[in-house]
Image (tube, grey):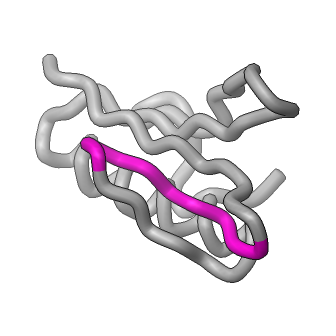
Amino acid sequence: MRQALYFVREGGERWIVSHSGAEYPYQSRHIAIEAAVDAANTSGKRGHDAQVLVRDGQTDWRAIWTYGADSYPWPGE
């Protein structure tokens, strides 16, 4: 099964969702995570091993949502 990873990180005044080399800016962390979870859920339905990761600090990534393991819609942190 192919992986579909969605990375959420702060990018100046915006929050960025990165996936497959593309970047999408959002106005807040919460909105960015919701968008990433929605996209990951769609990828999961298409047979991908989908996961959303958020950057904690400068170098560490933390998985916050995994298709098939976590509830959808995302309840928030």
Q: Nearer the viewer, residue 2 or 45?
A: 2
Q: Quick one: which residue is furthest to the front in this view?
A: 12
Magenta highlight: main SS: strand
Q: Nearer the viewer, residue 7 or 74?
A: 7
**Residue interval drawn in magenta:** 13-21
Locate residue 58, reporting x and y percent: 81, 30
Residue visible at 77% across and 74% down?
A: 13
Q: In the drawing, does residue 16 fall left or right of residue 11?
A: left
Locate residue 51, reporting x and y percent: 45, 34
Give above or below for 69 relative to 34. Answer: above
Residue visible at 67% across and 40% down?
A: 54
Q: In the drawing, does residue 22 fall left or right of residue 31?
A: left
Q: How many marks?
A: 0
Give above or below for 17 relative to 20. Answer: below
Q: In the drawing, does residue 45 fall left or right of residue 28?
A: left
Q: Nearer the viewer, residue 26 or 40?
A: 26
Locate residue 47, reporting x and y percent: 14, 35
Q: In the drawing, does residue 31 fall left or right of residue 42?
A: right
**Residue 20 covered by magenta stretch:** yes
**Residue 69 covered by magenta stretch:** no
Q: Which of the image's four quarters has the N terminus?
A: top left
Give above or below for 72 relative to 69. Answer: below
Residue visible at 75% across and 65% down?
A: 12
Locate residue 39, reporting x and y percent: 35, 59
